[in-house]
Image: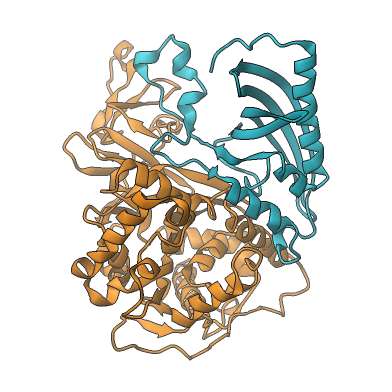
Chain colours: A orange, B cyan
């Protein structure tokens, strides 16, 4: 690398170099400085309810098994055999007593301990199996069922890491009497794009809707979003956008889920369910958050939540120019099965690999990488200065608050990104 | 899925194949509104997600152990299909193609569909269940080209000289989707 990180992101992060997106050396620093040190999303507890349940996850490019142990506790281990490194779990999800490596059948408990080495019966010297379990993820914690892991044993508690983002997350997660659940395996979409652009897109970029998605989103709908919309940054890298509906707004205008395809066209059962949830929202999350109608959320570094279309998403890097983008439909855990099936279409109609809106997003994410990965333009960094300095505190909403057109969410992300990369750059 | 197709007359087989060839030609020539006219208004259009399923030890030695069905998160599952759409969805997709601001299709991708292995699986008094395979070559301006491979499980209704599509389930041959979009008309 012929430059330092401070040459890639200027002081107020209003100018962002193309090399942030494309340089393999920058990507190596991201692994150490960000993915080695952050709380990374692993899954939701609803996916692993019973002892022996497991799902696969990733922390950056490292494969992880998230499981429920026989004692009911959560476990996260690196999915790589201690003998020759093969993945020992190959199903996306399931329930098991043992993970078995196909090569020599070393087997591991669902908690990650090495159970058997079949070959050792023919040998006199027995290895100490206690030292040969799967490598555990050093820290694991959950918030309202969302499970995170960290490779940094000294990381701050998850609650502190999420900080005031909890206020916004809980507006959704606490809205339902039994919280939420994830439906099925994630949709996994591999794109020739950098992992940060999907994150930025879901962190606060509401305003591209009027342009990129103008063939689908009518201008009047977008105007209403922007008129009632707020963009918030709680901690740099964490952000939320949402509408704060007027106090006298009709229940159908405020209720989560009503504006999706399943809510709109699903009939009386789903609509009555959504109205009932909204009727009790103030009691559950307070009058202010009951009026919140979320749009996009981001948890640093790579978890996104799309409230309006009921989806959690993780942007897993696969190198500077490739991303494995995972998404799940999320539904209220207490809803009847038929209602859940309708509500999942609020996600799949517009998002995921078949979604009408996200097919437009994914195309620009790929094109942005192409535009970044060019020569002779390093003197023209990207302009991230829209709305510079226009954010500020709000009497009721925690964090820095502004209109959705202000790109401060992205500047905050890149300020944190720069500082964290500089910390490992200095150390090396 | 049953192993055997039902016996068809050469004429009926030819009619079914002719329907699918016409459909592929309309889609490749971007005559999407004409394609929409082939749909029954109550159409169900499904594209299940396909997962890497855990082997169930109790099913070892059986066809069920490695069946395609157990990999599918379809309409009846409590997983999440990639698409489960009605006529409204398909109409929005079709109309979007004719707008100058549908940026990701502008300029449009070049496609070529090859449809084959057309088999009539059952026929009731009013409906025909037909499976077919497809390869769809897809090339977007300035991007790599992609091959979409899959099976379609259709329910057709007789309509005039030909058929109407009442239900389509698209079984893609991928778990990880390394394709620009599954939002195409398969």
Q: Residue at x 31, y 80 (%)?
A: A247
Whether residue A23 sits left or right of residue B108 in the image: it is left
Q: Would residue B185 be visible to someone looking at this image? A: yes
Whether residue A104 sits left or right of residue A358 in the image: it is left
Please determine whether, in this image, residue A375 is positioned above or below residue B38: below
Q: Residue A58: horizontal and vertical position, in percent?
A: 43, 47
Query: Which of A232 and A171 lies nearest the eye of the viewer?
Result: A171
Q: Residue at x 31, y 81 (%)?
A: A397
Please determine whether, in this image, residue B175 is positioned above or below residue B4: below
Q: Residue A331: horizontal and vertical position, in percent?
A: 35, 51
Q: Residue at x 33, y 16 (%)?
A: A118
Whether residue B94 sits left or right of residue B168 in the image: it is right
Instruction: Tell me which corner region of the image, top left, top right, bottom left or bottom right, holds residue A252.
Output: bottom left
Query: Which of B63 and A321 lies nearest the eye of the viewer?
Result: B63
Please determine whether, in this image, residue B50 is positioned above or below residue B10: below
Instruction: Tell me which corner region of the image, top left, top right, bottom left or bottom right, holds residue B56.
Output: top left
Q: Residue A98: horizontal and vertical position, in percent?
A: 30, 26
Whether residue A113 sits left or right of residue A380 in the image: it is left
Q: Residue B32: horizontal and vertical position, in percent?
A: 75, 48
Query: Which of A401 and A332 lies nearest the eye of the viewer?
Result: A332
């Amino acid at each position: 690398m012929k430059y330092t990180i401070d040459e890639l992101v200027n002081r107020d992060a209003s100018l962002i170099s193309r090399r942030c997106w494309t340089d393999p050396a920058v990507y190596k620093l991201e692994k150490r400085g960000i993915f080695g040190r952050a709380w990374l999303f692993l899954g939701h507890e609803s996916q692993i309810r019973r002892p022996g349940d497991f799902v696969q996850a990733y922390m950056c490019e490292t494969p992880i098994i998230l499981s429920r142990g026989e004692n009911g506790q959560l476990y996260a281990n690196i999915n790589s055999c201690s003998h020759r490194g093969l993945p020992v779990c190959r199903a996306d999800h399931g329930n098991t007593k043992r993970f078995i490596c196909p090569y020599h059948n070393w087997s591991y408990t669902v908690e990650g301990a090495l159970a058997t080495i079949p070959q050792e019966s023919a040998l006199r010297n027995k290895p100490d199996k206690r030292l040969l379990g799967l490598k555990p993820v050093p820290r694991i914690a959950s918030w309202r069922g969302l499970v995170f892991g960290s490779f940094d044993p000294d990381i701050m508690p998850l609650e502190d890491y999420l900080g005031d983002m909890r206020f916004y997350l809980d507006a959704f997660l606490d809205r339902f009497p039994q919280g939420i659940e994830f439906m099925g395996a994630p949709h996994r979409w591999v794109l020739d794009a950098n992992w940060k652009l999907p994150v930025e897109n879901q962190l606060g970029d509401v305003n591209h809707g009027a342009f990129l998605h103008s063939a689908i989103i009518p201008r009047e709908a977008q105007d209403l979003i922007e008129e009632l919309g707020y963009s918030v940054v709680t901690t740099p890298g964490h952000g939320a956008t949402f509408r704060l509906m007027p106090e006298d707004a009709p229940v159908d205008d405020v209720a989560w889920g009503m504006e999706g395809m399943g809510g709109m066209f699903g009939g009386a059962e789903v609509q009555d369910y959504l109205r009932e949830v909204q009727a009790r929202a103030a009691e559950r999350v307070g009058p202010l958050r009951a009026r919140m109608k979320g749009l996009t959320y981001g948890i640093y570094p790579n978890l996104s939540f799309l409230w309006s279309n009921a989806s959690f998403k993780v942007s897993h890097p696969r190198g500077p120019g490739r991303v494995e983008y995972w998404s799940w439909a999320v539904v209220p855990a207490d809803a009847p099965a038929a209602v859940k099936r309708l509500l999942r279409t609020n996600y799949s109609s517009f998002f995921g690999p078949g979604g009408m809106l996200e097919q437009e997003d994914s195309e620009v994410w790929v094109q942005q990488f192409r535009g970044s990965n060019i020569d002779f333009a390093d003197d023209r960094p990207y302009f991230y200065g829209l709305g510079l300095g226009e954010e500020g505190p709000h009497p009721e909403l925690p964090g820095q608050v502004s209109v959705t057109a202000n790109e401060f969410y992205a500047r905050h992300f890149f300020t944190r990104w720069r500082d964290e990369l500089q910390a490992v750059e200095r150390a090396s | 899925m049953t192993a055997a197709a039902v016996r068809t007359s050469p004429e009926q087989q030819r009619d079914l194949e002719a329907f699918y060839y016409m459909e592929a030609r309309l889609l490749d020539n971007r005559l999407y509104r004409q394609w929409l006219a082939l749909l029954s208004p109550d159409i169900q259009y499904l594209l299940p997600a396909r997962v890497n399923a855990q082997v169930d030890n109790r099913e070892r030695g059986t066809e069920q152990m490695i069946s395609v069905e157990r990999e599918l998160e379809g309409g009846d599952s409590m997983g999440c299909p990639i698409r489960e759409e009605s006529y409204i969805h398909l109409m929005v997709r079709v109309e979007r193609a004719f707008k100058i601001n549908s940026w990701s299709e502008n300029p449009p991708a070049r496609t070529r569909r090859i449809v084959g292995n057309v088999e009539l699986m059952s026929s009731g008094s009013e409906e025909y269940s037909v499976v077919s395979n497809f390869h769809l070559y897809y090339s977007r301006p300035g991007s790599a080209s992609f091959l979409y491979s899959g099976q379609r499980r259709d329910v057709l209704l007789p309509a005039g000289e030909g058929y109407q599509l009442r239900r389509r389930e698209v079984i893609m041959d991928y778990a990880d989707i390394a394709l620009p979009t599954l939002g195409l008309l398969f």
